[in-house]
Amino acid sequence: MKLIYKDKEFEINEGETIKEALKEEITENIITCNFNNEIKSLNYKPKMSGKVELLDYTDTEGKRVYVRGIMYVMAMAIEKLYPKSHLTIEYQLYNSMFCTFERMQVTDELLKEIKEKMQEIIDEDIPIVKKTMTAEEAKAFYEKEESEKGILQINTETKEVVSLYYCKDYYNYFYGVMPISTGALKVFDLVKYGKRIST
């Protein structure tokens, strides 16, 4: 099989990822890719030849993947620090995401602790791995875990496959492509906005 990138052809073997095939072309700012007009993870393993465009966080789709990754790391950090709290990601406004942090008062000290934990997770450069389950496997999983993270995926009769993103022992559901590791998320900030967190 072949990948076409910037009008050049690259060989890719079956089972090889786009990242592996284009390792000499991928800089540290590249966070995702467009393969045959579909946004894919850099860990995507093509089953056919195709055209690839590498995207960084300045591209529209690249920015979405980057923001999604920051939200994931923030949720992970909050669960590690405050497992009884509840984070709700509400909406995006330009370059910021607004989140409600329930059962905890949002203070400067709280944000400092969360930012430090997020930076620790990012510095570890931990792989973010997508895992899929059948609907039946997912039901058994949720019964065992007693968790609500992503449970809405199985609340439909037409859902045959359930996907979760894992980062070490942490998991959560996010719709869409994610960065392949936490180390890709170099820049972020958290600020208090009324009773919300803006990131």
Image: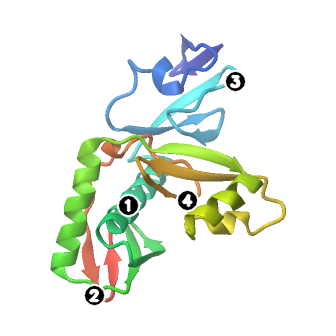
Q: Amino acid at mark 2?
A: Gln
Tag 2 secondary structure: loop
Query: Is tag 3's residue or tag 4's residue first in the polypeptide sequence?
Result: 3
Point out the frontmost of discs 1 and 3.
Answer: 1
Q: Residues within 10 Å of mark 2 (few under 14, many from 20)?
A: few
C-alpha gap between disc 2 and disc 4? 25 Å
Q: Which mark is residue 173?
A: 4
Residue 84: % across, % down: 39, 77
Point out the frontmost of discs 3 and 4.
Answer: 4
CB contact under 8 Å: marks 3 and 4: no
CB contact under 8 Å: marks 1 and 3: no
Query: Is tag 2's residue or tag 3's residue first in the polypeptide sequence?
Result: 3
C-alpha gap between disc 2 and disc 3? 49 Å
Q: Residues within 10 Å of mark 3 (few under 14, many from 20)?
A: few
User: In this rendering, does residue 78 appear at all?
Assistant: yes
Q: Which mark is residue 105?
A: 2
C-alpha gap between disc 1 and disc 2? 18 Å
Residue at the right extreme of this rendering: 157
| Residue placed most toward the observer, 76 or 177 | 76
- Relative placement, left or right, of 89 versus 113 is right
Q: Which mark is residue 76?
A: 1
Q: Amino acid at mark 4?
A: Tyr
Q: Amino acid at mark 1?
A: Met
Seen in the picture, residue 189 relative to 43 is either above or below; the reply is: below
C-alpha gap between disc 3 and disc 4? 25 Å
Q: Residue at x 68, y 48 (%)?
A: 133
